[in-house]
């Protein structure tokens, strides 16, 4: 007999009453992107002008990050962010139904050889990304560009339905989705196979995480240091994943070599060369295209 929250007869891990929502989301995902962008315009209007979703957080983050800008410039950047974010929302949903050929046309990797050269050496590659551009499309795009070699770390959601839906969405085109607590186990299991694991390492690290602190966009900022530790422990290559939107629905991804596991292992105690290099690359990208970053995060909620 099925219990509340799952169905043993259908194989669903979630309650039956989520099925109409699943079909609604899948139906929307099958719409062409130009039509979905009409919905995105409505989402933008609601977020920026009606609900004003985390408006104060966005404006405060921008004001502190770009003190040289006038209040009018900050507000324009904030509204440009909401327009970008609304488009990203429908693009992420589109992953549930997008054809592989269409995604490949919309996601261009400018220098894939930096990745494939490490695969030829059978090295694990840590791909360090951020909430820039469309971060969900990067993983699916990499799964198509590097078949059977791409995985991404994610934090499982508390809601069983959305956890199931998002995991299927992320893995539909061939990527592996690795729960955050299984990161080391995954890397050890695939050592020597030539694979890449994507980590979004721009979140705010708390004091319990023993973070690395550095000046970042005029602010004292904490970063997770797991990339340094994993790279040193498993002799990983490390690439920064830069992404920028060329126009609506089209993105360009460029890899940049960062200090690898050998450099991290040889670094003096208390220094984190991988994380510091990542911070500088991300800072440059955020200055170049500030509207393409996810400013709704409370990125600077911790103090040293």
Image (cartoon, grey):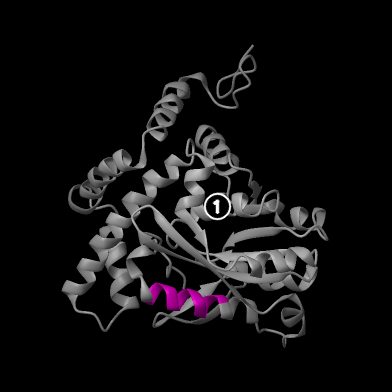
**Is 94 left or right of 262, judged from the image as shown?**
left
Name the residue: 68% across, 53% down. 181
Judge whether residue 283 is colored magenta.
yes
Q: Is residue 58 above or below residue 87?
A: below
Image coordinates of residue 262 in percent, x first then y, are 77, 79
Magenta stretch, main secondary structure class? helix
**Is 40 left or right of 29, judged from the image as shown?**
left
Residue nearest the observer in this picture, 196 or 261: 196
Is the residue marked by circle 1 packed among few (<14), some (14-19), or many (20+) residues within 10 Å? many
Name the residue: 55% across, 26% down. 14
Which residue in the protein does label 1 denote?
141
Q: Is residue 142 above or below residue 300?
A: above
Mark 1: which secondary structure?
helix
Image coordinates of residue 278 in percent, x first then y, are 56, 75
Name the residue: 66% across, 66% down. 115
Residue nearest the observer in this picture, 40 or 69: 40
Q: Is residue 272 visible in the rendered structure shown here?
A: no
Q: Is residue 104 above or below residue 299?
A: above
Instruction: Magenta stretch: give its range.
Output: 278-287
**Is 81 left or right of 181, judged from the image as shown?**
left
Image coordinates of residue 192 in percent, x first then y, are 83, 61
Judge whether residue 203 is colored magenta.
no
């Amino acid at each position: 007999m099925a219990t509340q929250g799952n169905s043993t007869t259908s194989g669903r891990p979630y309650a039956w009453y989520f099925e109409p929502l699943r079909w609604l989301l899948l139906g929307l995902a099958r719409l062409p992107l130009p039509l979905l962008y009409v919905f995105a315009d409505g989402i933008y209007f609601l977020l920026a002008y009606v609900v004003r979703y985390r408006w104060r957080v966005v404006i405060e983050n921008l004001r502190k990050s770009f003190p040289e800008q006038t209040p009018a410039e900050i507000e324009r950047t904030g509204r440009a962010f909401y327009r970008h974010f609304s488009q990203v929302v429908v693009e992420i949903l589109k992953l549930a139904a997008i054809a592989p050929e269409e995604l490949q046309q919309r996601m261009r990797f400018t220098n894939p050889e930096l990745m494939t050269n490490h695969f030829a050496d059978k090295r694990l590659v840590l791909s360090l990304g951020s909430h820039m551009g469309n971060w969900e499309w990067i993983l699916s795009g990499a799964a198509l560009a590097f078949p059977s070699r791409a995985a991404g770390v994610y934090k499982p959601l508390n809601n069983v339905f959305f956890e199931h839906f998002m995991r299927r969405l992320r893995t539909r085109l061939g990527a592996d989705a690795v729960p955050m607590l299984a990161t080391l186990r995954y890397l050890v299991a695939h050592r020597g196979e030539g694979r890449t694991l994507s980590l979004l390492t721009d979140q705010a690290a708390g004091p319990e995480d023993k973070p690395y602190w550095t000046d970042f966009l005029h602010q004292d900022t904490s970063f997770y240091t797991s990339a340094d530790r994993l790279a040193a422990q498993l002799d990983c290559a490390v690439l920064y994943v830069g992404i920028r939107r060329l126009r609506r629905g089209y993105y360009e991804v460029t890899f940049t070599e960062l200090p690898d596991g050998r450099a991290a292992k040889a670094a003096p105690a208390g220094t984190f060369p991988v994380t510091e290099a990542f911070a500088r690359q991300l800072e440059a990208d955020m200055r170049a295209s500030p509207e393409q970053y996810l400013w709704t995060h409370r990125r600077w909620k911790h103090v040293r």
